[in-house]
Image (cartoon, rainbow, N blue to C red):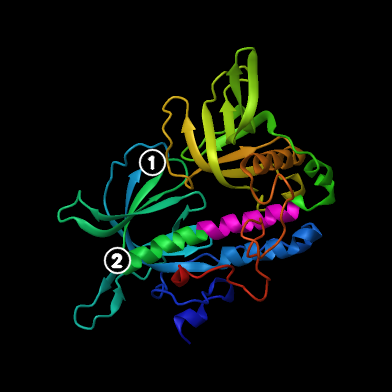
Amino acid sequence: MSHRESRPLSVRNLAPITSTRPHVFIKPAPQQPPNVGNAPSDMHSTLRLYDAFNQKVYFEGYLHKMNDLTVDGKPVHDRQWSKLYVELCGSVLTFWDASHVVKNEETGETEITKEDPILPTYINVADSIVNIVGTYQYDNPPRENVFLLSSAGSNRYFLQAPNPHVMNRWVCAIRLACYEMTKLHEIYTRTFLARHTWADLFEKQNSKFEGWIQARFGGATEWQRYWAVVTDKRDEKRLFGKKSIASRGQLMFYETKKSKVPAITIVNVLCAYAVYPENPKLINMGTMLKVEGSMYSSTTKDQHNGSANAFALLMTASSKEMVQWLIGIFDAFKLYGRPERLLSDASNTNSLNFAEPVFGHQPRLFLEVGEI
């Protein structure tokens, strides 16, 4: 029996993989999926999709890695490259020290000089940004096929692939995993919002919604309380007072309710969704949402990270407030059919549940790395 066939069914990859993980690289048994019976009945099919995502191996193989910045943005002192075996499963990158894996010059076969089990380390790529660097000029000789991964907080890593093809596959794999997780959150959100409990909230069309909210922005690790306002109107000064006129959507965060200028503003919002709380027992008490778009601060006025790479995690005091914020953001940025009618059509690209898989027919969710 091959090594691939001997892997537990729950961690087998149904698509071609780059190489075979040596037996000394111990992968802990996957967590048992939460008992769907403990979840609200309307969420059963969605939770099966999350389980399929968490078991999906996107790519694996050998890389070299150098840690660049710590979680608080400080340079790492030990800037050494290390050889690793890496697997991307769901949103988790798993790393095994491969310094004891060598190539036999005579046979060309891979040999392991250490038989003791090697336990892994992990990076969650759910909120990551990955970009191709190409040539890393600061080594002598320069390193080729390098890409850059920025993860939680200000953590940053340089990763080197063996050739350009593998480098591109890794970048595509990480971006696909992030996309598919976002897509699942959108499907989860559509199911959550379809509940009769929130029907009356969708009947109102307000051009402005505001209130206190906890926020954590990309690159930060701390939550902070803000007075937030989302609107698609702006006040224009007139001779006798001011008038509210139509404008593009803005999500503004003020340090106090009386502040005149927002500390942070998010525009060009591409998606907004509730975040699955990872435990089905907490679904009915969910209070976290995520917004992705362009962000700038009042201190710099410079937009950064591009229209799709900035994000904010928001936490409300109740599930009802979370729904109100979602509706307010949908309306201000004209998302998912709002402010008219919230779409629910898996064939409509503007719908929250666009491309929703039918579990059992598409166990690998939306796309394969080779299709990108």
Residue 312 shows up from this direction: yes
Q: Position of residue 25 (x, y in %)?
A: 42, 68
The residue that disc 1 covers is 70
Q: Is residue 107 magenta?
A: no
The residue that disc 2 covers is 164
Q: Is residue 38 left or right of residue 109?
A: right
Work out whether residue 119 or residue 258 is closer to the camera in this orientation and state it.
Answer: 258
Residue 30 shows up from this direction: no
Q: Residue at x 40, y 60 (%)?
A: 171
Q: Is residue 180 magenta?
A: yes
Prevailing SS of the magenta stretch: helix
Q: Bin the neighbour count of mark 1 within 10 Å (Cα to Cα): few under 14, some 14-19, many 20 and up.
A: some
The secondary element bearing badge 1 is classed as loop
Q: Position of residue 136 (x, y in %)?
A: 24, 53
Q: Label 1 near label 2: C-beta < 8 Å?
A: no
**What's the distance in space between the residues labelled 2 and 1, CA to CA?**
27 Å
Q: Residue furthest left?
A: 140
Work out whether residue 145 or residue 196 is closer to the camera in this orientation and state it.
Answer: 196
